[in-house]
Amino acid sequence: NAGVTQTPKFQVLKTGQSMTLQCAQDMNHEYMSWYRQDPGMGLRLIHYSVGAGITDQGEVPNGYNVSRSTTEDFPLRLLSAAPSQTSVYFCASSYTTGELFFGEGSRLTVL
Amino acid sequence: AQRVTQPEKLLSVFKGAPVELKCNYSYSGSPELFWYVQYSRQRLQLLLRHISRESIKGFTADLNKGETSFHLKKPFAQEEDSAMYYCALGGAGSYQLTFGKGTKLSVIP
């Protein structure tokens, strides 16, 4: 099993560009989520999903969109990138409360 | 609102010394507490959870509801313990976790 796979690992964008961070899991987990990790801020929840067709906002959802058309995939879309979105993004999935399985992270720089 | 506080950004200890990483939380319901660890160039992973009351890699953590704390302890630090540690809070039956800002543990040889 690959677990949680995120692509790309690194990305540089210009302000105003759009992009999608991909996340896929092969563990048949119903719950998936996106976090961003910033120095001194820890991990903050952006969006989450408790199953296909169901998504909800986390703590810092502005500027991001998500969809969940299948159990396996949970892409995160940046509609118009801003320098404040420079961060490391982590996708995580879970089959039970509290035990999150994380991807390796995607480092995004917005110039 | 739920909140997790890790007061130390950085904690440096000598090899063989005891380690205590502090975590305090604020939550109105029945809390579930976790410690996650991120070693250099590795994924963030679950270290332990309070309901299991087990010791992982020599680390233990006890939930103190009176003091709203969940400190992580190890009697003798090892160099391989150097990592970023996050305390996380969830509610009973909830998948969502609120993370603290993290403590970077550096074990000095």
Image (cartoon, rainbow, N blue to C red):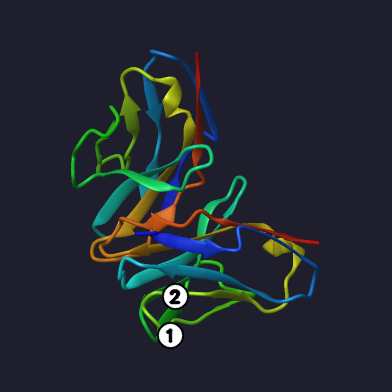
Chain at tag 1: A
- SS for callout 1: loop
Quarter of the image where one finds residue A2: bottom left
Q: As displayed, is residue B39 above or below residue A10?
A: above
Chain at tag 2: A
- Identified at 62% across, 46% down, the residue is A39
- Location of the C terminus of chain A by quadrant is bottom right
In the shown orientation, is residue B92 left or right of residue A54? left
Q: Residues within 10 Å of mark 2 (few under 14, many from 20)?
A: some
Q: Which label was assigned to residue A73? A: 2
**How far across and how far down the image is residue B81, in percent?**
42, 28
**How far across and how far down the image is residue A63, in percent?**
64, 75
What residue is pinned by disc 1? A69
Residue B49 visible in the snapshot: yes
Whole-angstrom CA distance, mark 2 to mark 1, is 7 Å
> How many marks do you count on the picture?
2
Disc 2 marks a residue whose amino acid type is Asp
**How far across and how far down the image is residue B105, in percent?**
49, 29
- Identified at 24% across, 62% down, the residue is B92
Seen from the viewer's position, the closer of residues A9 and B102 is A9
Q: How crowded is mark 1: few (under 14 residues within 10 Å), some or many (20 or more)?
A: few
Quarter of the image where one finds residue B1: bottom left
In the shown orientation, is residue B31 left or right of residue B82? left
